[in-house]
Structure formats: C-alpha cells, structure tokens
Image: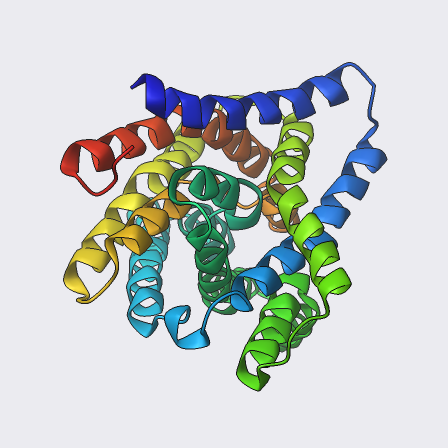
C-alpha cells in the first residue's frame, strides 16, 4: 500500500500546489489559463507525436483496444443518459451533460500523469487512443443531444458543424495526425527538433496536474448531493467497471494496456465540464462534480491500483 501511495501522493501534491498557488494569489486566473493553453497546445501534442514516432505504428494502434474502450464508455454514457432521462425524468440537455460527466475522462490532465507513473511510456500511446474515443464519439454525442434537448431545432445542425470544426482544430488530434503521418512515411525528425519535442512532452504531466489544481480553486458544492453523487459514482466507479468488463470480453488485449485503460477510466471529469454544464443550465452541478470527483479520485485511483496489484494485473 505504501508503494501505491508513493504513486498517487505526488500526483495529488502537484494538484494541491496548483490550488495553493491560486488561493494565495501567487498566480492569477488568467495566468493559470495560460499554463493550461501551453499544456493543451504544446505539451500534449508533443507527447502524442513522441509516442507515435518511437515505435512501429502497428504496435501502437490496437483496434481491439479502441473497440473495448469505446464499448465501455458508450455503455456508461447510455446508462447515465437513461437513468437521468427515463428514471429521474430530467430534461434531455441535463441528462446528456450528466452522462458526459460519467463517461468522459480527463485523459490529458489527470489520466496520463497517473498512467505514466504506473505503466510508463505506453501511457502516451493510450492517451492518443483514448482521445480518439472521447473527442470523436462521447463528447460530440453529448453536445448534439444537449442541443436537441434545448428545443432549438436550427441549432442542432449548427452544433454538429461547430463540433466538427472544433475537432479539426483540436491540438491533440492534430498531434495525432502529425504523428501518424510521420510514422507512416518513416520520416525521421531531426535531432534538435526531436529534443525540443521531447522536452515539451516531459513537461505535460506536471504542468497538467498544476493546472487542474488551479482550476479547482473557487468551485463550491451546494445542496446538489443526488446529481453530483451519481455523476461522481458513474465516473470513478462504473466507468472503470464497464471498461474492465469490456476488456474482459474483447480478446487479445495486452494486460498492460488493460491496466492503463482502467487508470484512464478512473480519472475524474474533463476539465471543461463546468463550461459545458454552464451552457446547458448545470453550472453549479458540473462545477461541484468536478471538484468532488477530483478529490475522491485520490482514493479510487489508489484502490484500483491496489486491486490490480492484488489480482496480478500489475506488479511493483
């Protein structure tokens, strides 16, 4: 257990440092956002490019992994949507946002640093694969459903177009395309340029955790126990469980990839969740869910690492 805490504690210390930096006023909100832009537009794309150019492409893109992670995430998204929509009679837009919170992980800012500590360099490959599922499947589906629930018929098509344009401009997906192009063409990155990419990639994990801590400052939890509780439970418990079942059912997946997938699935909500929630009338619930999930993930991630160790899936 001390070994496991040795993995998770430094990660959450960095998150805490980001929170303290905002609380103390050392770093202002716009400055913290600047660090976030650096991570999203520079460090994470560099991380993906480095991962895709360091080994043969056929060793990286595992279709069975994409199928398993996609099935598990779709199952949680669908279950959350039906729970809110049919059982609790919530509006479609609110139901779609809650389902999104349960099924989309903060892969870049929390999932990757945790997975990198546990499984090492393959974490960068899994980051690229998971971002495909999250950005091409789960997030677009949630936004389209939320717009449909807003009863703005003309805006649904606009949302589809806006989502497509956002995907084209997504820096991590651009890094994915660049990395694939380099790998397929067997073009060697010049030494000085690769060194710069390597340095940027190394900065991704610590900087991302610092930004998450800063983003938590000022978020509050106020009398929203049911909605916040089910979003957090769906994200931290049922999403990893669904991923485990999906990976068990889909054959031929490397156990190391399965371990990494569980860690990514156990990461808290995407960092832009409060912004999306605000757009559809769930500002308070989404912000509170992000705060609670991030704090609770210290315990659930530690538990999942312990369970994987006890089952023999991981060894330290």
Q: Quadrant of residue 263?
A: top left
* Residue at image coords 29%, 64%: 71
In the picture, the quarter occupied by the N terminus is top left
Which residue is most to the front?
Answer: 191
Q: Can the viewer see residue 286?
A: yes
**Extreme residue in the bottom direction:** 185
The one of 278 and 242 positioned closer to us in this rendering: 242
In the drawing, does residue 243 fall left or right of residue 58? left
Residue 180 in percent (x, y) is at 56, 76
The residue located at (84%, 36%) in the rendering is 30
Residue furthest toward the top?
24
> Taking 212 as reference, is 313 above or below it?
below
Query: What x and y, as percent, mark residue 83?
Result: 31, 48
Q: Using the rendered view, name the quadrant where residue 179 is placed.
A: bottom right
Task: Please state which of residues 271 and 174 is positioned toward the viewer in this rendering.
Answer: 174
What is the image's colouring? rainbow
Residue 34 higher or lower than 176, as above or below: above
Depth order, front residue of 63/199: 199
Q: Is residue 104 visible?
A: no
In this rendering, is residue 303 above or below 66? Answer: above
Residue 221 image offset from top left, x and y in percent: 55, 23
Residue 150 image position (x, y, % from top left)? 57, 60
Q: In the visual, does 215 lie left or right of 92?
A: right
Residue that appears at 60% across and 27% down = 15
């Amino acid at each position: 257990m001390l070994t496991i805490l040795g993995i998770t504690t430094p990660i959450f210390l960095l998150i805490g440092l980001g929170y303290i930096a905002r609380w103390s006023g050392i770093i202002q909100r716009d400055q913290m956002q600047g660090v976030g832009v650096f991570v999203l537009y520079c460090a994470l794309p560099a991380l993906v490019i480095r991962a895709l150019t360091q080994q043969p492409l056929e060793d990286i893109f595992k279709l069975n992994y994409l199928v398993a992670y996609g099935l598990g995430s779709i199952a949680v998204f669908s279950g959350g949507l039906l729970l809110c929509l049919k059982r609790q009679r919530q509006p479609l837009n609110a139901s779609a946002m809650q389902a999104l919170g349960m099924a989309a992980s903060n892969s870049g800012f929390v999932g990757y640093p945790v997975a990198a500590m546990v499984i090492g360099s393959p974490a960068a490959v899994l980051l690229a694969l998971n971002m495909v599922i999250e950005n091409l499947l789960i997030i677009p589906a949630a936004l389209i459903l939320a717009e449909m629930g807003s009863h703005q018929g003309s805006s649904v098509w606009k949302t589809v177009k806006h989502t497509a344009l956002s995907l084209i401009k997504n820096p991590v997906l651009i890094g994915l395309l660049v990395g694939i192009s380099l790998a397929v063409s067997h073009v060697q990155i010049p030494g000085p340029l690769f060194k710069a990419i390597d340095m940027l990639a190394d900065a991704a994990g610590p900087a991302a955790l610092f930004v998450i801590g800063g983003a938590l400052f000022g978020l509050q939890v106020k009398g929203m126990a049911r909605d916040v509780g089910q979003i957090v439970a769906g994200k931290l418990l049922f999403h990893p469980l669904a991923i485990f079942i999906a990976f068990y059912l889909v054959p031929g997946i490397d156990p190391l990839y399965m371990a990494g997938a569980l860690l990514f699935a156990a990461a808290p909500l995407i960092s832009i969740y409060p912004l999306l929630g605000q757009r559809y009338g769930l500002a308070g619930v989404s912000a509170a869910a992000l705060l609670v999930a991030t704090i609770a993930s210290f315990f659930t991630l530690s538990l999942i690492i312990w369970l994987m160790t006890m089952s023999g899936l991981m060894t330290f």
